[in-house]
Image (spheres, rainbow, N blue to C red):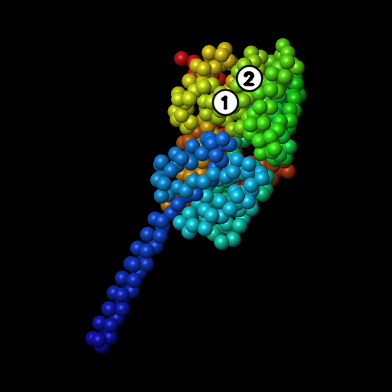
Amino acid sequence: MKKLLCLALALALCLALACGAVAEESAAAEENWKIAILTGTTSQGEEEYRAAQRAIEAYGAERIVHETYPDNFMAETETTISKLLAFASDPEVKAIVMCQAVPGAAPAFNKIRETRPDILLIAGVPQEDPDVITAAADIVLYSDEPAQGDSIIETCADWGVEVFVHYSFPRHLAMETIAARKARFEENCAALGIEYVEATAPDPTGDAGVSGAQQFILEDVPLKMKEYEGKKVAFFSTNCSMQEPLQVAVLAEPNAYYPQPCCPSPYHAFPASLGLESLQVGGDDTDALKQIAAKLQEHDAVGRFSTWPTPVNMAIVAVGTEYAYDYIQGTITSKNDAAAVAAKFEAAAPGAVLANYTDANGVTYDNYYTILLGPVDFNDYIE
């Protein structure tokens, strides 16, 4: 009997030690985590790129893996997909944040799901239709493009704008949210007596490339101003790489107006177009707005430009990364926690209005969050 008791005690001790070893191994495994971030290059999406670099500074290079998709992403979709699949092949990668979620995001995410259903997938600034990207990603984040069709035209009306020029191209106009914003532009312009002008620009991912699209803007704005001579003309472009030449061209025309960049931010092209080399992308937003206002004042253009007070795309990367971290640590237990998303945006962009996207058919997507901020009046930042 005594031998049996000793044997039982020895067995219990071994089991306890084994369980402890397993627990320690499990804890160690949980500590071996990474968040992968895929962004554009500095030429196609500097803000997202800088936001990823800031995430590396915050969490460490051993925790954040950062890659970029090709500038000509429309012709190199397979490269984008392969980079996302490469992230997922690393078992330590527990979450992927992609911004901008250019074409290729949805098929890559769907493929990842087949072998890594555990990975949290976050898509920022999607370029695939809502029903497609929401089915592939856990969370989708984007500025509220349809609502901008209201706020931008309201700004133009306050300025007394008489003509609104909308630069875009077929690829962008085929995107549901951009098409919805365009429709509101047209409706609001008609209601307020503003002439709406649809101007087709070269697609930067096409044969002309980024430089060709930028040159077109620099040449076309003066032509439009001559065509509508004596009138106040506002210009808007749907493409990131066109913002710098558009700002430069508008600045040179006394009757030209710039209500907002496509990706609203104090840093979207303003540092380059205004010669503010010292303006750090993603720095102090209020200081950035003051520097921009001072430069605009030099050109008598304070009342002709606007933007949002916080860089929305940088906020999307930051919020996505923070959400991923909390999910990995177990602080957030759901892949789609609406309250947590809202709280993180309020911290990153105070005053942000979040809503779930509803498409033209009335379908609301509970994992697609749109963000809206109010326009900046640069007069408020003149010192």
Q: Residue at x 61, y 57 (%)?
A: 111
- Mark 1 or 2, closer to the camera: 2
Under mark 1, the amino acid is Thr
The residue closer to the viewer here, 17 or 73, is: 73
The structure residue drawn at horizontal position 75% and vertical position 21%, both measured from the top left corner, is 195
In which quadrant is the N terminus drawn?
bottom left
* Label 1: how many Cα within 10 Å (few below 14, some 14–19, many 20+): many
Residue lying at the far left of the rendered structure: 2
Q: Is residue 236 visible?
A: no
Q: Which mark is residue 116?
A: none
Above or below, comparing residue 348 to residue 2 in the picture: above
- Picture residue at 40% right of the left edge, 45% below the top: 60
Query: Measured from the top left, where is residue 354 in percent x and y?
Result: 57, 37
- From the viewer's perspective, tell me whether residue 157 is left or right of residue 89: right
Amino acid tagged 2 = Val
- Image spot of residue 369 (x, y percent): 59, 41
In 3D space, how far apart are the residues under numbered discs 1 and 2 (Cα atoms)?
14 Å
In the picture provided, is 111 more to the left or to the right than 289?
right
Residue 14 appears at what percent x and percent y? Answer: 31, 75
Which of the marked residues, 1 or 2, is nearer the chain's N terminus?
2
| Residue wearing tag 1 | 307
Q: Report the label total.
A: 2
Tag 1 and tag 2, C-beta contact below 8 Å: no
Element at badge 2? helix
Q: Position of residue 95 (x, y in %)?
A: 50, 51
Residue designated by label 2: 250
